[in-house]
Amino acid sequence: MRSVARRILALLTVVSLGLLACNSTSSADASCAVHVVTTVSPITNIVQNVGGSLVCVTGIVPEGTNSHTFEPAPSDAAVMSDADIVFINGLHLEEPTRELAGANVGPGVKIVSLGEQTITPDQYIYDFSFPKESGDPNPHLWTDPLYAGRYAQIVAEELTALDPGGAATYASNEAAFAKKIDDLDALVRQVTKTVPEQNRTLLTYHDSFPYFAREYGWRIFGAIQPSDFADPTPAEVARLIDQIRQEQVPAIFGSEVFPSPVLEQIASETGATYVDDLRDDDLPGDNGDPDHSYFGLMVSDFVTFMGALGGDTSPFDGFDVTNVAGGETATYRS
């Protein structure tokens, strides 16, 4: 009898736990029409802005993490299996995460590669960090605001296809996002004109700004972190020092997340100002803060390097960097 009683108790416990789990899942499902998984925080934020409260979005790649080398945890497979759609940057930025998604999403769930839908192969940029012979183009499209605007258009189209009932919300949010992109684009062009032409040159820790440079008439002088993420050789450092001295580059830029002793050395030996608070996919502040947004990220970067290179960045002061939609249903890992 005791054995039977124990079995009945165990069965009731399992049933109770199952009901709790179902209730919990139902509650979560009720709050969101679409469950989205993303990779880097700029993409997470773009989805947040377009989807608003209709979408629950989880960014897999923690902020401040090297997205090229990030390896998702086995537990992330469960996150992928619950997704209705997955948005990745593509262009080989986050291959381990893409592979995890491919192995774990449900039948018919799309993995949308934003980069490949934004530019064509003839628009790919190959450079010293991403040489063509290696086969992978530079993937950092979002540092060009116009490409980020295209990302938002794709997101709106895909969310509408999944959730036609939310079409008006997605269209309205995307339109508001596009308006801010247009305003930011105009400001970038305005402030760029105030930077002395010979100073429109970037030497950064990570090679994140070539698409920005192509669009706005800047030049990428170099990057300390190559595509294989090794430190540059002494000969490469010496070459950069010689170039900086020859071209009188006034400032070089490090990462807030990844300190670079090499850049400190270069600045010390050339007299260039070393600015170490640039960021490429780590949003400022925390979720819910006014500047925790794609716009906050880009304005922070533009003010940082345009100001250090002699530009008048005051026009950015009036730009609203807050999100079109709040982050209550967005999860950013840190």
Image (cartoon, grey):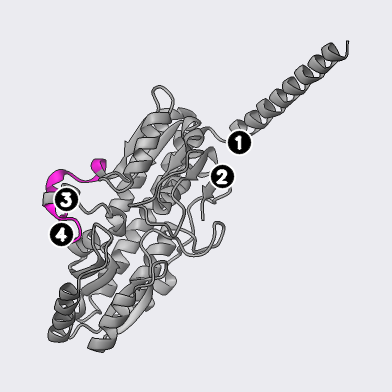
Q: Can the viewer see residue 232?
A: yes
The residue pinned by badge 3 equals 124
Residue 202: % across, % down: 23, 72
Residue under pointer 2: 329
Give the distance between the C-alpha atoms of the residues marked 4 and 2, in whole angstroms: 38 Å
Relative height, residue 107 to residue 276 (above, below): above
Please indicate, yes or no, whether residue 311 appears anywhere in the rendered image: no
State the SS at label 1: helix
Q: Residue at x 22, y 54 (%)?
A: 138
| Residue type, label 4 | Asp
Picture residue at 43% right of the left edge, 49% below the top: 61
- The residue that disc 4 covers is 127
Q: Disc 3 marks which amino acid?
A: Tyr
Tell me the element at label 2. loop
The crowd level at tag 3 (other Cα within 10 Å; few <14, some 14-19, many 20+) is some
| Earlier sequence position, callout 3 versus callout 1 | 1
Q: Which residue is mark 1?
A: 31
Query: Height in image: 151 above or below 280?
Result: above
